[in-house]
Image (cartoon, helix red, strand yellow):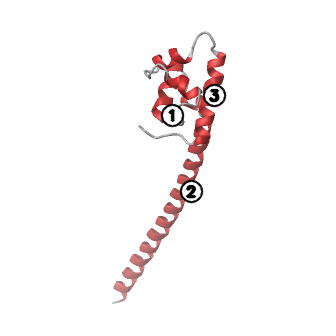
């Protein structure tokens, strides 16, 4: 997965990562976290010092896994975006179902009308 994060989500990720590392001071440092995540030794430091403009999503996932936390703890706005996208898909699905139901109703009406015509002949 090579998808890069948006600027807003990148900033959120960096802020939350800093907070988590601060809370775990002494237990987790950037170099150790980088190694545990299977990244280069300076990867986390580079992210925190803005030397890495926008980390790839798979990098963030590796960091979350190494920290033993769910991805949404680092980027909660991803959840919000997912809910918005899901709500949009649900609305599109509802509209398609409605249109489909109307089409089937029209087809049933056409069949009934055809049967009536054939009975009259």
User: The N terminus lies in which quarter of the figure?
Assistant: top left
The residue lying furthest to the top in this view is 26
Find out whether the residues at labels 1 and 3 contact each other: C-beta distance under 8 Å. no
Residue 25 visible in the displayed image: yes
Residue at 54% across, 20% down: 67
Q: Earlier in the sequence, mark 1 or mark 3?
A: 3
> Element under label 3?
helix
Q: Residue at x 57, y 15 (%)?
A: 29
Q: Which residue is more in the foreground, 115 or 107?
A: 107
Mark number, residue 16:
3
Which residue of the protein is positioned furthest toward the bottom in this rendering? 121
Q: Which residue bears the numbered disc 2?
A: 91
Residue at the (50%, 67%) spot, across then down: 99
Q: Which residue is disc 1 drawn over?
A: 55
Q: Which quadrant holds the C terminus? A: bottom left
Residue drawn at point x = 48 percent, y = 35 percent: 57
């Amino acid at each position: 997965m090579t998808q890069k994060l948006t600027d807003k989500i990148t900033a959120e990720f960096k802020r939350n990562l800093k907070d988590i590392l601060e809370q775990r001071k002494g237990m987790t440092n950037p170099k150790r976290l980088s190694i545990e995540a299977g990244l280069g030794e300076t990867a986390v430091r580079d992210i925190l010092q803005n030397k890495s403009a926008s980390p790839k999503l798979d990098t963030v996932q590796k960091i979350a896994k190494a920290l033993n936390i769910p991805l949404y703890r680092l980027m909660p706005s991803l959840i919000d975006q997912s809910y918005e996208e899901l709500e949009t898909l649900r609305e599109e699905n509802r509209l398609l179902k409605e249109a489909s139901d109307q089409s089937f109703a029209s087809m049933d009406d056409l069949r009934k009308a055809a049967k009536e015509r054939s009975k009259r002949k």
